């Protein structure tokens, strides 16, 4: 991978995958795929929240979510999204702009299967982002459902799916103590990728 990174035209997806692998091996976090997903809000304002990338499948970055959530509604209205990663252990930041599309059923099943039992139960009982009349009632629903299903395999509910993001732009930045941060930008072209350096 080091040889790949010093080539005149490295493959940005592979650079990202290598950086993510390095981050995963160094980080103490349980959510090494965590990033900020930014969408175009229905009110025209940018909207951002944390999600976790669960799968890399060239050229896509994949995350799961309820298909009736606000982020899903916004993505359906405008498929243009951004992903921002900040990794303090390695002092690296990655910014990605791309086009999101809905997962197929098979991939959605795979991503849901990777969720822990508690997360799967929440996916069954919660309508993400909807008004909540009573926190206590939701807690009790969770307790009952978890106890009923703790030894059972949970099938993915129809409303839970996810998206794959195909990048059209990557920016890799390596922070330096001198503040001369090393920044590379890749733009997707018809015949491949164009790479340029930008100033810190």
Image: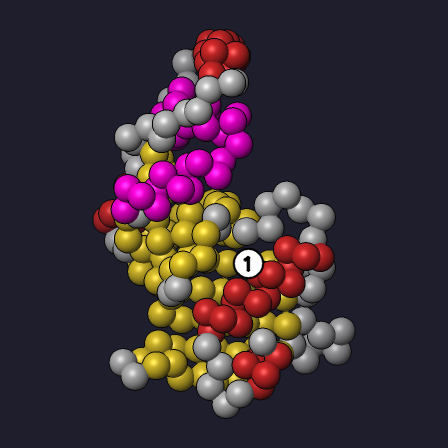
Q: State whether the magenta stretch is mostly helix, strand or loop.
A: helix
Q: Quadrant of residue 89?
A: bottom right
The answer to whether 21 appears left or right of 9 in the picture is right
Decide if residue 37 is in sight here.
no
User: Count the marks: how many?
Assistant: 1
The scheme the figure's colours follow is secondary structure
Task: Provide the secondary structure element on which disc 1 rests.
Answer: strand
The answer to whether 193 appears left or right of 36 in the picture is left
Residue 197 in the image, given as x and y percentages of width and height:
52, 84
Q: Quadrant of residue 111?
A: top left
Residue at 44% across / 24% down in the picture?
153
Quadrant position of the N terminus in the picture: bottom right
Residue at 76% across / 73% down in the picture?
177
Is residue 120 rendered magenta in the image?
yes
| Foreground pick, 194 / 59 | 59
The answer to whether 74 appears left or right of 62 in the picture is left
Residue at 50% across / 58% down in the picture?
84
Q: Image height check: is 150 above or below 166?
A: above
Residue 24 in the image, given as x and y percentages of width and height:
64, 55
Decide if residue 110 is in sight here.
yes
Q: Give the residue at mark 1.
A: 85
Residue 32 in the image, given as x and y percentages of width and height:
60, 51
What's the magenta region? 104-130
Is residue 109 rendered magenta in the image?
yes
Q: Image height check: is 150 above or below 156?
A: above
Residue at 63% across / 43% down in the picture?
30
Residue 182 in the image, given as x and y percentages of width and height:
62, 79
Q: Image height check: is 93 above or below 114?
A: below
Mark 1 neighbour class, 10 Å CA radius: few under 14, some 14 to 19, many 20 or more: some
């Amino acid at each position: 991978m080091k040889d790949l990174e010093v080539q005149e035209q490295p493959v940005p997806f592979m650079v990202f995958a290598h950086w993510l692998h390095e981050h995963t091996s160094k980080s103490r976090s349980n959510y090494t795929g965590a990033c900020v997903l930014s969408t175009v809000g229905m009110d025209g304002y940018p909207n951002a929240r944390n999600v976790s990338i669960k799968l890399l499948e060239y050229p896509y970055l994949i995350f799961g979510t309820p298909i009736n959530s606000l982020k899903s509604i916004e993505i359906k209205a405008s498929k243009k999204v951004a992903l921002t990663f900040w990794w303090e252990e390695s002092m690296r930041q990655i910014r990605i702009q791309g086009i999101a599309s809905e997962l197929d059923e098979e991939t959605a099943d795979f991503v849901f299967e990777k969720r822990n039992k508690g997360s799967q139960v929440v996916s069954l009982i919660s309508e993400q982002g909807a008004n909540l009349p009573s926190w206590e009632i939701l807690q009790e629903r969770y307790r009952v459902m978890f106890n009923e299903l703790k030894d059972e395999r949970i099938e993915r509910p129809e409303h839970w799916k996810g998206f794959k993001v195909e990048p059209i732009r990557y920016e890799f930045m390596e922070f330096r103590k001198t503040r001369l941060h090393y920044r590379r930008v890749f733009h997707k072209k018809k015949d491949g990728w164009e790479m340029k350096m930008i100033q810190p």
